[in-house]
Image: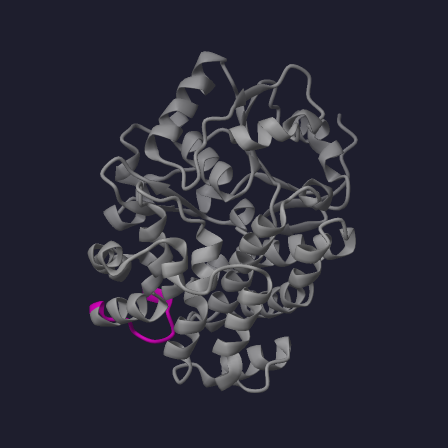
């Protein structure tokens, strides 16, 4: 039997969190009876040599994951899985490889097309536990997808939709802060703002889940305290560890639901004419959505202000805008090359997005249109 220590955290999944935790991978594979895992990653990580740090012999690697992964990425991954007779999946990277790995694991044992499993298409009850084991190893501190029940996929019809099910939560998670040490400053900033947005939005969700709410506030405080440190000094392992924990906490609180920041970001992530980072989009929308929600959840806004050192709830929008600017990210959509004509066709998609349902203030189609204009 493998000499595998108990998980650091057992909440939603078994989470092994410590510096150097990647060394546990062989024992974890043995415990889960995985003999031929498929590593799902992207070509950028392969080129950095990070994949070679995994303690595996002759690994089977699928590196065809694109930013904002598409339906075709998932089907290509399934072909690779079957070609090599794999019996498990290792998701290695940021949110894109992890989300794509979830879709691959799903399609290995579920009939295509993938689109039928989208939450918006009534796919939740169609997703069963009949899937190969999936180990998630994040290399960024941001998405929280390693413990999330969703996978965001850009489909061939041009829509970006969420697959949503507790059966999509990875079987086990290895969180090794050392894997984030080489993350460039701008990617550190963007993924960090993604984690901050997750914590802020889930904390304000109207769903009753005080456990998730407490985790969200703690994660938000950790990220706000450390994000500027890691952007300015990426080798600070203590700050990297805190950011990875904050990102993990953001993912743990997805059970409480997100909000309209994500509703606005998701359609933009599906654009083909320009590649937009999800975390950067969240950073731009967050101040505008906080202003929009301010009077709908005053107690939550007051607690957020106290936790992060803002002068008052009313000061939160400027607090987040100034933070985004200090860490070098754009604060307007126009700075990312977007125009009003790019946004107008997306308003309906934003309104229909599953995250709108848990925004603390009810959202109308006109609200989505106005928020896009405000952020431009």
Above or below, comparing residue 95 to residue 107 in the picture? below
**Magenta stretch: dominant SS?**
loop
Nearer to me, 125 or 52: 52
Q: Position of residue 326 (x, y in %)?
A: 59, 66
The residue lying at 57 percent from left, 80 percent from top is: 305
In the rendered view, tell whether residue 345 sits above or below residue 303: above
Q: Residue at x 60, y 46 (%)?
A: 140
Point out residue 306 in the picture as x, y percentages from the top left corner: 62, 82
Q: Quadrant of residue 205?
A: bottom left
Say whether residue 111 is left or right of residue 202. Answer: left
Quadrant occupied by the C terminus? bottom left
Q: Looking at the picture, does residue 248 appear above or below residue 318? A: above
User: Is residue 325 shown left or right of residue 288?
Assistant: right
Q: Position of residue 158 (x, y in %)?
A: 25, 41
Residue 42 % position (x, y): 51, 31
The stretch drawn in magenta includes residue 260: no
Q: Is residue 12 visible?
A: no
User: What segment carries the magenta color?
Assistant: 357-365
In the rendered view of the protein, which quadrant contains the N terminus?
Answer: top right
Count up the numbered dots. 0
Task: Give the quarter of the image for residue 291.
Answer: bottom left
For image coordinates 26% across by 35% down, the residue present is 156
């Amino acid at each position: 039997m493998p000499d595998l220590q108990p998980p650091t955290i057992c909440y939603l999944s078994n989470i092994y969190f410590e510096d150097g935790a990647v060394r546990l991978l062989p024992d974890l594979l043995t415990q889960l009876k995985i003999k031929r895992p498929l590593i799902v990653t992207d070509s950028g990580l392969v080129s950095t040599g990070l994949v070679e740090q995994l303690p595996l012999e002759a690994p089977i690697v699928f590196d065809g994951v694109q930013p904002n992964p598409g339906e075709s990425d998932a089907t290509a991954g399934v072909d690779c899985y079957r070609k090599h007779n794999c019996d498990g999946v290792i998701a290695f990277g940021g949110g894109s490889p992890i989300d794509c790995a979830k879709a691959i694991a799903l399609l290995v044992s579920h009939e295509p097309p993938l689109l039928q499993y989208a939450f918006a298409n009534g796919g939740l009850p169609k997703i069963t536990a009949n899937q190969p084991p999936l180990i998630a190893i994040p290399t960024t501190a941001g998405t929280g997808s390693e413990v999330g029940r969703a996978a965001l996929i850009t489909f061939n019809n041009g829509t970006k939709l969420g697959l949503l099910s507790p059966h999509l939560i990875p079987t086990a998670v290895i969180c090794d802060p050392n894997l984030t040490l080489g993350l460039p400053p701008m990617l550190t900033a963007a993924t960090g703002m993604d984690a901050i947005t997750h914590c802020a939005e889930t904390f304000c969700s109207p769903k009753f889940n005080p456990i998730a709410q407490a985790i969200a506030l703690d994660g938000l405080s950790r990220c706000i305290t450390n994000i500027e440190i890691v952007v300015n000094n990426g080798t600070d392992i203590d700050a990297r560890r805190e950011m990875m924990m904050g990102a993990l906490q953001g993912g743990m609180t997805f059970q409480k639901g997100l909000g309209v920041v994500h509703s606005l970001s998701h359609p933009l992530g599906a654009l083909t004419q320009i590649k937009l980072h999800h975390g950067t989009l969240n950073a731009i929308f967050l101040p505008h959505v906080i202003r929009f929600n301010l009077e709908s959840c005053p107690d939550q806004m007051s607690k957020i202000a106290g936790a992060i050192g803002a002068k008052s709830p009313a000061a939160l929008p400027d607090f987040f805008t100034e933070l985004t600017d200090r860490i070098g990210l754009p604060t307007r959509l126009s700075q990312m090359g977007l125009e009003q004509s790019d946004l107008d066709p997306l308003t309906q998609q934003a309104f229909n997005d599953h995250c709108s349902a848990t925004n603390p203030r009810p959202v109308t189609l006109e609200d989505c249109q106005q928020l896009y204009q405000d952020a431009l």
